[in-house]
Amino acid sequence: MKKGNPWALIPFVVFLILFIGSGIILGDFYAFPVIVAITISGAVALAMNRKEPFARKVDIFCKGAGNSNIMLMVIIFLLAGAFSEVAKGMGAVDSTVNFALSVVPQNLLVVGLFIISCFISLSMGTSVGTIVALAPIGVGISEHTDITMALVMGAIIGGSMFGDNLSFISDTTITAVRSQGAEMKDKFKVNFWIVLPAAIITGIILAVVTMGETGQVEHLSYSFAKIVPYIFVIIFALVGMNVFLVLALGIVLSGAVGLIDGSYQLMSVLQKIGEGMAGMYEMAFLAILIAGMVEVIKFNGGIDFILQLATRRIKSKKGAELGIAGLVSLTDLSTANNTIAILITGPLAKNIAEQYDIEPRKSASILDIFSCSIQGLLPYGAQFLAAASVAGISPVSILQYAYYPVLIGICGIIAILVGYPRKMKTQI
């Protein structure tokens, strides 16, 4: 490892000042477009290191931005966006919610809402989308019972982070897996058994705190056929089918269901595919720009400096895993966006993981678990802001009911301390 250069980290500092500074001044962490902040920071990176010709630095930036892992990530983003939008457009979300509400006991409505949001977020791959879909139902449940509005929103946010952390089409999961060179199904299996206890305990807590509260929910119609594309994607991704094929077939299946039941005409299916892809453009370009900027920072010695600083006191594999957890947690606190946090810390985590023989499936799980844990506890994060705006309450009031994000952080630490998972045996 070459000698680190702290000055090479100035672009990171510029990004944080622009992003956090504008959030504090404007009272809105999403007012300053993050892609503009990254573009400015990338320009600062290119302006540094005057010893190198500008054309050389641009070439380094482009090589980082065009890394094969980044390009694969971008394509998966676009396909995931298309699938999510086509499925949603033909009524898959509404059918799933209505079906689940029809089978949830009236005295376990909040527990049911938590479980529904777990499944919806796992299927859609978006926590904010899940919250937007379910928050109005949560408001109705709170208004017809004595259950606190903030508690209901806390249950929905918790469930939405379950899928954000596990879904095969979640941008955080895709980013964590691609940045570490892991297999999606391997990461899922490790991740699932770490967070399952947190989900079960959350369900028990919600059942206890809402005990004795009942309410009536209007049972709306649903079509099981519209739920099938979600089930298809989850099952076939789990058995190891290539993610490109899974998403492509998911898009075709969703479109076919919509065409058969009259929800779509051929042109409207194509338009939904375009809308879904367009919805992922910002995330795709963020991945490209961040990768380019990180490559220039790495060339200038900034990554080596962070690694030397971060690993100075690391003496063991467990210490390295806790170090990765700390890095992504701090980055998420600063950026209020778990995908960006993983994009920024991913290369660092991969270096630490290789140095301390941490399997890619484990380092990817750590990145995803701890970024989602912190994201689910940020009153200034998109999830809290979306839920609070629908409910008409303060985001801070929801924080005390954020059971699941706290519990996945605890489960993640326990998994590190007990050494789960055991190292896979190498095939000869």
Image: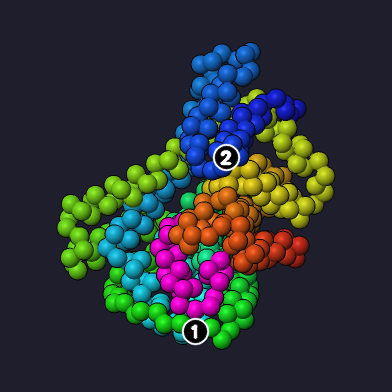
Residue shown at the point (56%, 28%) measured from the top left: 41
Quarter of image, res 203:
bottom right
Q: Which mark is residue 196?
A: none
Q: Secondary structure at mark 1?
A: loop
Q: Which mark is residue 214?
A: 1
Q: Position of residue 173 (x, y in %)?
A: 52, 54
Q: Relative to residue 9, is residue 108 depicted above or below?
A: below
Q: Quadrant of the C terminus?
A: bottom right
Q: Relative to residue 239, is residue 310 depicted above or below?
A: above
* Left or right: residue 377 compared with residue 143: right
Task: Provide the residue designation for mark 2.
Answer: 23
Q: Secondary structure at mark 2?
A: helix
**Magenta extent:** 126-152
Magenta segment main secondary structure:
helix
Residue 376 visible, this orientation: yes
Residue shown at the point (59%, 54%) measured from the top left: 379
Quarter of image, res 226:
bottom left
Amino acid bearing label 2: Gly
* Left or right: residue 1 compared with residue 168: right
